Image (spheres, rainbow, N blue to C red):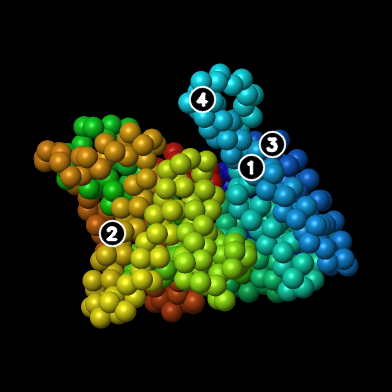
Amino acid sequence: MLFHSATFLILVTALVALYWVTPWQRARLVLLFLSSLVFYGWRHWPSVFLLLGSIAFNYALGRVLESRKSKPLLALGVTVNLSFLLFFKYGRFVVDQLIHLGALLGLELQVPKPDAWMPLGISFFTFQVIAYLVDVYRKEIPAERSLLVFAVFKSFFAQLVAGPIVRGKDLLPQLRGLVPFEVARLHRGAWLVLCGLFLKVGVADVLGDYVDYAWKVPDTLGINNAWLVVYAYAAQLLADFWGYSTMAVGLGLCFGLTLPINFENPYGASSLREFWRRWHITLSIWLRDYVYISLGGNRSVSKARAAFNRLATMAIGGLWHGAGWNFVLWGVLHGLWMDLELLTEKARARWPKWLGLVITFHVVVFLWIPFRAPSFDALLMMLTRMTSGPWDINTPTQTAVMTLGFLALQKPLFALVRAERVDTLKPMAEVALAAAMVWLLLAYGSARQDFIYYVF
């Protein structure tokens, strides 16, 4: 069920009220678990059985790993979890590549393709549970004793479909005890839900209408509109995913649970490494802790091996985003640029800060082009129109103003959303901002688009 649908907002409001009038923690957990299954299975109910199977398997394996530290058992757990991800998300892609390879060799391969449907959020909850198993194996956390607590940890609807990727050490302790009701926490949670809703419906979806249309007909774009598409997608993607993550954190607070922040003004970074410390923070930490370090990191290895480790990590991060060579290319280019940054670190240290900000921002924006491109032909066409297209006098003013305004106001917007206490705002200012958001949502918003990261 989409966070930005009226049905979801009505149901979750009733759920929050029922949750807080329930005086027993076990009953609250049952309520959260059952409601999470309903929300998750609303669009495609068979996905619920995959989620339930994952819960049962990983709960049991976690208990065994705690009592018997075994690399083969850990490898089994990681393999089983990744096998479902590979089958549902990458099965058709792998088969297509085999058929294409066979055609190049003069062979006509008849390989059955897996079904096209993909369980929502499988990339996120797979990474979440792999982190849990590895942390139990490393003795960083104990295995969860309560199946109910583990089930809520694995299925909590606020972060199940598109993150943030929550670690066991962060969420499991919060689920074990009765959380007291606090008006301030509920107030802040509701504010974050409203802010996230505005970012999604009032910004991302409005920009998305133009971006989607332009990518269908890149050969018709003038040079100015081609550049506008690139900037508009950078703004759309941030507003969309930041909006979802903000709503997720807000929903968690509405139930007395603290989820990790996933964004911190990423377009204000002065290097690509800093960008990844600000963008999709929980994925960056996951890749660092479970891929980069496992490959050897940058300690006790040669500079060449450290560079390879970064490149491989970013390639895996790119492939995680989708079954396509464009995502691999996007990840590899990020890895290569990070390696280049390290090679030129001393020279860059002498640059003025604004130059690093401008260069990093445009590197990120340009790398979003293969990320968004529906095909390599469309990618090449967009690059062509950006460099040699005619000037188009029909530039959509609303899209241009919204794009430039949103990108220019990043710092104050993040400060407003990230305010630790909403009541630091004057009451009239808060009411005015909330009213303005609601008016803009009603006047200009649309709820036609899924969250972009639902498909990852």
Q: Are marks 2 and 1 in contact (CB under 8 Å)?
A: no
Q: Residue at x 28, y 32 (%)?
A: 217
What is the three-letter code of the residue carrying label 1? Leu
What is the three-letter code of the residue carrying label 3? Trp
Within 10 Å of disc 4 (Cα), the crowding (few <14, some 14-19, many 20+) is few
Q: Residue at x 72, y 68 (%)?
A: 135
Within 10 Å of disc 2 (Cα), the crowding (few <14, some 14-19, many 20+) is some
Name the spot of residue 143 as percent of width and height, x first: 81, 67
Distance from disc 4 to disc 3, alpha carbons, whole Å, reads: 41 Å
What is the three-letter code of the residue carrying label 2? His
| Side (left or right) of 450 relative to 60 | left
Q: Nearer the viewer, residue 356 or 109?
A: 109
Report which residue position mark 3 lands on.
Answer: 45
Give the answer, above or below, for where 21 lies relative to 219: below
Distance from disc 4 to disc 1, alpha carbons, whole Å, reads: 25 Å
The quadrant holding residue 114 is: top right
What is the three-letter code of the residue carrying label 4? Leu
Query: Sequence order check: which comes first, mark 4 or mark 1?
Result: 1
Report which residue position mark 2 lands on.
Answer: 362
Query: Sequence order check: which comes first, mark 4 or mark 3?
Result: 3
Q: Nearer the viewer, residue 353 or 311?
A: 311
| Side (left or right) of 295 relative to 205 | right
* Secondary-structure class at tag 4: loop
> Mark 3 or mark 2, which is nearer to you?
2
* Mark number, residue 86: 1
Q: From the image, which quarter does the N terminus lie in?
A: top right
